Amino acid sequence: MKEKLTKIREEAIKRISEIDNLDRLNDIRVAYLGKKGELTALLKSMKDVSAEDRPKVGQMVNETREQIERQLEEAKKRVESAALNERLKRETIDVTLPASAPKMGHRHPNTIALEEVERIFIGLGYEVVSGPEVEKDYYNFEALNIPADHPAKDEQDTFYINGDILLRTQTSSVQIHEMEKGRLPIRMIAPGRVFRSDEVDATHSPCFHQIEGLVIDDQVTFADLKGTLDSFAKQLFGEDTKVKFRPHHFPFTEPSAEMDVSCFKCGGKGCRFCKGSGWIEILGCGMVHPHVLELRGIDPEKYVGFAFGVGLERIALLKYEIDDMRLMYENDDRFLSQF
C-alpha cells in the first residue's frame, strides 16, 4: 500500500510540474482526486487492510492527498502568472501616446432651429419666457376663449391628470400668465413642449414643440404683425422669401390668418418639396381677441395685440429638408451626426 501511494504521489507531482495550462491542471486533479481517481480507488481498498494498519494507511493517504493538492495550487498560481505576463507583453500600452479623443456630442436639430428663432426675435426686441407644462384647463382653454363646449377643444383633446389639470396642448397658456402680471407693453415668445393625443406618423407626434409669440401695446395693427413675420421668414429662410396670408379662424384671435412662405427650394416655381404649389404653410397668427384681453383685465379699447404660433419641428423639418418627423426622436447617431 505504501509503495502504491509513493508511486501515485511521484507520478502526480511529475505530471503537475510539466503542465502549462489550466485545462490540463484540472484533468490531473480529476485523475487523482476525483470520484473515480486513483486515490479514491485506493481508499476503497482499505477494507482489505488489517484493522491495526488502517490508521497508518489512512494517514498516509491524507498526506498524499494534501501534497498533491498543494502542488496543484502552486502550479495554478504559476500558470496564471505566466498567462498574465504573456498578456502584458501582448497588450503593452505606450503611456507616452496621446489619449483617444472622446466622441463629442452636439446640438439636436430642434435645438439648432430653436436657437436661431430665439436669436431672430431677441433681435426684434422680444423676450423669451417659459411656463408650466402641467397646466390648468382654465389657462389652456377658457382664458384663450375656448369654453368647455367649444369645438376647438375636441380638436385638442389631450392628456388629463384630473378634470382641471392637464398637459398643455399649446404654449399659448404662457401668454395668459404673462398678461396676468400686468406689465405692459408685452413683446414675448414662449417656446416649449406641448402634448396632444395624435397618432405617431411622419408629421405628427403626441409630444412636440411650439413657439408662441405675443405683442400687446397701445398702437399695434395687422400691418405690424405682417411686417414682423415677414422679417422673421426672411431671416430664417433667406432674403428672397415671400409671405402670403390666408384668412383662417382661431378662437383667441380676430381676425386670424395662416401664413405661407414661398418655397425656398424652388423659389416659388413649384417642386416636390412644396407639392407643386410654390408655397409652404408655416404658421398661424392673428390679432388678439378683445375677449381674451378683457379676461385678463386689459382694456381692449386702449390696448391691442397680435399673436402667432409655429411648430418648432416644422421649422426644423423644412429648414433641413427632413421627410419624417420620427427621425428627430429615434436617437440614431447616423441621422443626428449630419447636423
Image: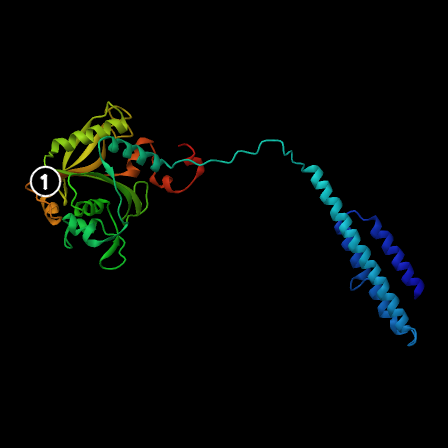
Q: Nearer the viewer, residue 267 or 172?
A: 172
Q: Residue at the bottom extreme?
A: 51
- The image quadrant of residue 160 is bottom left
Q: Is residue 142 left or right of residue 24?
A: left
- The image quadrant of residue 247 is top left
Q: Is residue 131 left or right of residue 1?
A: left
Give the x, y percent position of residue 204: 30, 43
**Residue type for callout 1:** Tyr
* Crowd around label 1: few <14 · some 14–19 · many ≥20 (10 Å): some
Q: Nearer the viewer, residue 178 or 284?
A: 178
Q: Residue at the right extreme?
A: 3
Instruction: Name the residue carrying label 1.
Output: 303
**Can I make out residue 255 in this image?**
no
Q: Secondary structure at mark 1?
A: loop
Which quadrant: the C terminus? top left
Q: Residue at x 83, y 58 (%)?
A: 68
Q: Residue at x 82, y 55 (%)?
A: 71
**Can I make out residue 131 in this image?**
yes
